[in-house]
Image (spheres, grey):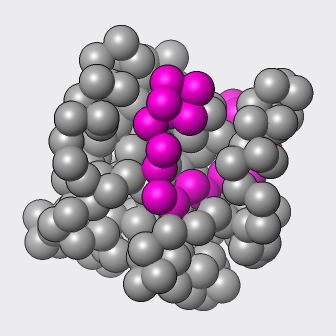
Amino acid sequence: MYAITDNLRAKLKEPLGTLFPDAGLHPYLKSSGRKVCAVGDECAYRMIMAGVKPEIVIFDRMTKRAAVHEGVRGALSSYCRNPLRVKNPAGMITGELEAAVAGLFQKGSGCIEVEGEEDLATLVAMRCAGESWLVVYGQPDAGAVVVMGGQAAKSKAGEMLAGFEKK
């Protein structure tokens, strides 16, 4: 299990990839020819509503520490009919979350509903994502961040995870 440190918390507020406003994100994703992993309820919801069908969705039914509205909840429930359910406390990355994310990347599709917080699953997804993948997560009040999968993403995620406190 990994616990975030105050130093890393500040670093993770900066985008880990390319920041897109919503208007530019969906056409880019549709034309990329890559598989998509969406991390976050609002991020996944906006993709689904725009006709982008992420292969992997990781969500926790919360946005900015508040419950998502009914439209988001309904869309995710319809899209992710039988999600894996894992526990992952805020500010942590559990072995259970790591295993679930890795398993979905091996399988190539699926959804994970996190009891707790899913934000840091982005780093796990980056570590798992090969060249044919994009990892997309929301950047509050700014749009969404797209990280191209592959060795650069794996290295960046590894560097960040090395700074976590191991529990």
Residue at x-position 19% and y-position 42%: 32
Establish if 58 lies above or below 1. Answer: above
In this image, 126 relative to 166: left or right? Answer: left
Q: Where is residue 55 in the image (x, y as percent from the top left)?
A: 47, 58
The answer to which quarter of the image holds residue 25 is top left
Q: Does the magenta stretch include residue 92?
A: no
Q: Residue at x 38, y 52 (%)?
A: 36
Query: Is residue 62 in view?
Result: no
Location of residue 41 in the rendering, given as x and y in whole percent from the top left corner: 65, 40
Give x and y (percent) for residue 61: 78, 44
Q: Residue at left 41%, top 66%?
A: 125
Q: In which quarter of the image is residue 112?
A: bottom right
Q: Residue at x 27, y 60 (%)?
A: 133
Q: Is residue 43 visible?
A: yes
Q: Where is residue 158 in the image (x, y as percent from the top left)?
A: 27, 74
Q: Is 1 rendered above or below residue 19? A: below
39 and 12: which one is in front?
39
Q: Tell me if residue 63 is in the magenta stretch.
A: yes
Region in magenta:
47-66
Is 40 displayed left or right of 52 in the figure? right
